[in-house]
Image (cartoon, grey):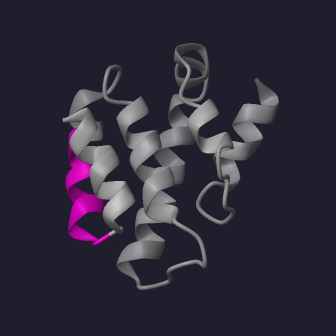
């Protein structure tokens, strides 16, 4: 669990590749809900300030936002709208659209 939490905490600064897909398991989401939302908020700050990293941060943020949709639907919906407005890239928009 601590390894997952550590990855989540750096997700706004580091490309997680396939590891990002491994993180949204229910037990990880439940235990790391605050860390997930904080990572999304920090990442959104980067995207809206045009501080775009050299990796697809948008898709990581979309995965984390979607992971929180069941436990924090209002927050996840707002995060999804904010992310879409930041023009995160096609992959992120597809992730958001798949989740609804």
Magenta portion: prevailing SS class: helix
Residue 78 location (% of width, % of height): 22, 47
Q: Is residue 79 above or below residue 66?
A: below
Q: Quadrant of the N terminus?
A: top right
Q: Residue furthest bottom?
A: 50
43 part of magenta stretch:
no
Residue 80 location (% of width, % of height): 26, 49
Write the residue at 36% across / 36% down. 66
User: Would you say 39 lies left or right of 85 here?
Assistant: right
Snapshot quadrant of residue 31: top right
Write the residue at 52% across / 66% down. 56
Front residue (pair 95, 61): 95
- Residue extent of the magenta highlight: 77-87
Snapshot quadrant of residue 20: top right
Taking the image as drawn, is residue 35 in sight?
A: yes
Snapshot quadrant of residue 98: top left
Taking the image as drawn, is residue 79 in sight?
A: no
User: Would you say 3 lies left or right of 9 here?
Assistant: right
Q: Is residue 1 above or below residue 6?
A: above
Write the residue at 42% across / 85% down. 50
Q: Residue furthest right?
A: 3
Residue 97 location (% of width, % of height): 22, 44
Front residue (pair 87, 82): 87
Q: Quadrant of the C terminus?
A: top left
């Amino acid at each position: 669990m601590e390894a997952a939490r550590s990855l989540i905490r750096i997700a706004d600064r580091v490309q997680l590749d396939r590891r990002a897909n491994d993180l949204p398991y229910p037990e990880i989401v439940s235990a790391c809900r605050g860390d997930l939302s904080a990572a999304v908020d920090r990442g959104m700050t980067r995207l809206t300030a045009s501080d775009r990293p050299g990796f697809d941060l948008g898709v990581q943020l979309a995965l984390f936002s979607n992971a929180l949709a069941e436990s924090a639907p209002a927050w996840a919906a707002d995060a999804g709208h904010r992310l879409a407005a930041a023009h995160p890239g096609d992959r992120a928009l597809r992730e958001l659209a798949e989740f609804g």
